[in-house]
Amino acid sequence: MKSIYHTRVTLLTKLRNRYDEQAWEEFVNIYKRYIMAILRNMNCSVDVQEDICQAVLLKSWEKLPEFTYKPAKGKFRNWLTVVTVNMARK
């Protein structure tokens, strides 16, 4: 069974262009649910989950054009989890 969170290297490559609206829309459609799940598991209040999620997506928009995915070092989801947890702890 294919995981919906399986990292698509082609998508990460497209995200190097901050203004590729289709790629960013796809990224949000795939990873917003993942970010929200992390926030729920952290017992963040429902009131702040959407705000933190938006902050994580903005941070991703800022950082992913420079991001180099190295599968041998870890999954992309690990990076996204760290960003999410850090944003939630602010």
Image (cartoon, helix red, strand yellow):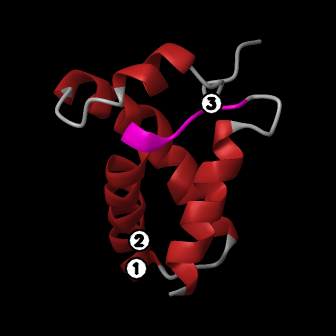
| Image height of 30 relative to 54, above or below | above
Q: Outermost residue, bottom direction?
A: 90
Q: Amino acid at mark 2?
A: Ile
The picture quadrant where one finds residue 83 is bottom right
The N terminus - image quarter: top right
Residue matched to label 3? 5
Q: Amino acid at mark 3?
A: Tyr
| Most frequent secondary structure within the magenta stretch | loop
Q: Element under label 3?
A: loop
Structural distance between the alpha carbons of marks 3 and 1: 23 Å
Instruction: Check contact, mark 2 vs mark 1: CB within 8 A.
Output: yes
Structural distance between the alpha carbons of marks 3 and 2: 20 Å
Q: Residue 48's mark?
A: 1
Structural distance between the alpha carbons of marks 2 and 1: 6 Å
Of callouts 3 and 1, which one flags the residue occurring earlier in the amino acid sequence?
Answer: 3
Q: Is residue 67 magenta?
A: yes
Q: Element under label 1?
A: helix
Q: Which residues are magenta?
A: 65-70
Q: Is residue 58 magenta?
A: no
Q: Amino acid at mark 1?
A: Val
Q: Nearer the viewer, residue 66 or 57?
A: 66
Of callouts 3 and 2, which one flags the residue occurring earlier in the amino acid sequence?
Answer: 3
Q: Element under label 2?
A: helix
